[in-house]
Image (cartoon, helix red, strand yellow):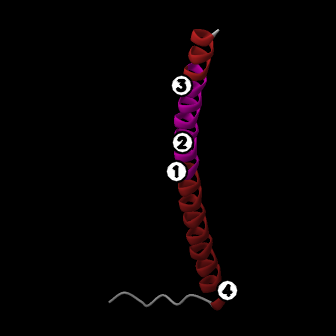
Amino acid sequence: MAEDIKFTDAELKSIESIRTQYAEITNRFGQISLTKYNLNKQEEQAHKDFETIRAEESRVLNNITEKY
C-alpha cells in the first residue's frame, strides 16, 4: 500500500492562498464581463438616442424650410 503524504502547514497555507487568488481573479473576470455588457447596452442606447435626435432635427429643419 502507498504511503500517506502529509503536507506541512506552510504548504497547506500556500495552496489555500493560490486557491483564494484564483477565486478573486475569476470574480474580477466576471465583473469585467458585466461591465462590458453594461457598456455595450449604454452604447446601443446612445446610438438609438442619436438616431432619434437626428430624425427630430431633420423634421424641424424640413418644417422650417417649408415655412420659409
Q: Quadrant of the N terminus?
A: bottom left
| SS class, disc 3 | helix
Instruction: Return the x and y of residue 35 as percentages of the image width and height.
Output: 59, 54
User: What label sits on residue 15 in the rendered view?
Assistant: none
Q: Within the magenta stretch, is there residue 5?
A: no
Instruction: Return the x and y of residue 12 as percentages of the image width and height.
Output: 60, 85
Q: Earlier in the sequence, mark 1 or mark 2?
A: 1
Residue type, numbered disc 4: Ala
Q: Which residues are magenta?
A: 37-58
Q: Earlier in the sequence, mark 2 or mark 4?
A: 4
Q: Nearer the viewer, mark 1 or mark 3?
A: 3
User: What label sits on residue 45 in the rendered view?
Assistant: 2
Q: Which residue is mark 1?
A: 37
Q: Within the image, what quadrant is residue 2 found in?
A: bottom left
Q: Which residue is mark 3?
A: 55
Q: Within the image, what quadrant is residue 26 found in?
A: bottom right
Give me the C-alpha separation between circle 1 and circle 4: 41 Å
Give me the C-alpha separation between circle 3 and circle 2: 15 Å
